Image: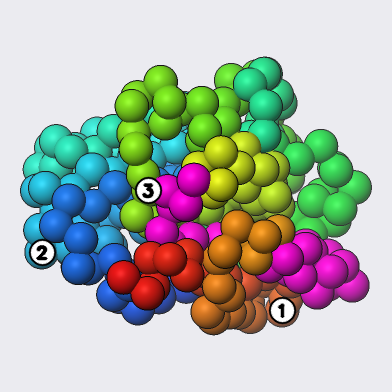
Amino acid sequence: MNLVYNLVDFFLMNNNEKEIFSYIKKEKKKIIFDVGSFKGKFTKKILKIDKNSINSKYYLFDPNPNGQKYINELRRNNKNIYYNCIGLDNKVKRKIFYLNKFFEASGSSFQTILKDDKMWNRSRKRILKFFNIFNQRKLKKFEEIKVKTNTIDNFCKSKKIKNIDLLKIDAEGHEEYILKGTINLFKKKLVNVIYVEVLSKKKNYEVKKNKIINFLNNFNFEFIKEYPIKSVSIMSNLKSSDLLFINQNYKSE
């Protein structure tokens, strides 16, 4: 079983952290937001790269309560990690979050706040079929839990966080809502680098990607690079990539 989990993890993860970090390494006291952190894998990789991590602050967000134990392990040697078991959105409210033991154990994708069950269930089943080397009946069931949601704007205001150097978002199709909940910071040019996943049906992918690019262009963000996650397309009817954006004001400094 662990072999299967590791395979899923390997196929669904990108390893672009060194390149992403290079854009903010000049900052002595970094503020990093890891949205959709779960086990904290992205943060763990950045911590290994950040030679001055003791002076940085890492804010992790994930609505899955089962991620707490993994983050606690990270915090043993890094007291500057702040874990928040909430969902991020464009509004403050309560939503349903869908959990699955298979994807949770692998620490990978397809746990989401989205209610479009038809699309997601079809994709999940195809991925489970791709790894059809053990009994999957129990793993096809999804648990629903109610979670609190907040906006990044509200969170930063309440915590008196003045800027974000790196905003990473991996929210399984929910990224547009999270970005819309960060508009006030965008307007004030207080976010420097954005690393966001785009996940959609293959036929809708380009439309969704361009929608995010155009949205961020309105706030002076330059689209730098696209990192395709090819395995998602192989295993499902979805297409996924990570997109890198840099605030042009920050780039010119």
Q: In this view, does 66 lie to the left or right of 239?
A: left
Query: Of label 2 and label 1, which has the lower sequence position?
Result: 2
Horizontal arrangement in the rendering, residue 43 relative to residue 218 (left or right): left
Q: Residue at x 85, y 42 (%)?
A: 117
- Measured in 3D between alpha carbons, the distance from the residue under mark 1 to the one under mark 3, in whole angstroms, is 34 Å
* Mark 2 crowd level (few <14, some 14–19, many ≥20, 10 Å Cα): few
At x 74%, y 55%, the residue is: 124
In this figure, which residue is indicated by the disc labeled 1?
234
**Could you tell me how many numbered marks the image carries?**
3
Q: Earlier in the sequence, mark 1 or mark 3?
A: 3
Looking at the rendered structure, the kind of residue marked 1 is Ile
Residue position marked by numbered label 2 in the rendering: 51
Question: What are the residue bounds of the magenta stretch?
Answer: 188-214
Q: Quadrant of the C terminus?
A: bottom left
What's the residue type where badge 2 is placed? Lys
**Amino acid on which the number 3 mark rests in the picture:** Ile
- Which residue is drawn at the image coordinates 29% and 47% (left, top)? 31
Q: Residue at x 67, y 27 (%)?
A: 91
Q: Is residue 154 magenta-colored?
A: no
Q: Indicate which label's residue lies in the foreground, 1 or 3.
A: 3
Query: Is residue 242 found left or right of 14 in the rendered image?
Result: right
Q: Nearer the viewer, mark 2 or mark 1?
A: 2
Question: In the rendered structure, does residue 198 fall within the stretch colored magenta?
Answer: yes
Q: Are the residues tagged 2 and 3 within 8 Å (C-beta)? A: no
Residue 206, placed above or below residue 56:
below
* Disc 2, SS: loop
Q: In which quarter of the image is residue 193?
A: bottom left
Residue 164's disc number:
3
Q: In this view, does 15 lie to the left or right of 81?
A: right
The local crowd at label 3, few if under 14, some if 14 to 19, many if 20 or more residues have their Cα within 10 Å, is many
Q: Crowding near pointer 1: few (<14 within 10 Å), some, many (20+)?
A: some
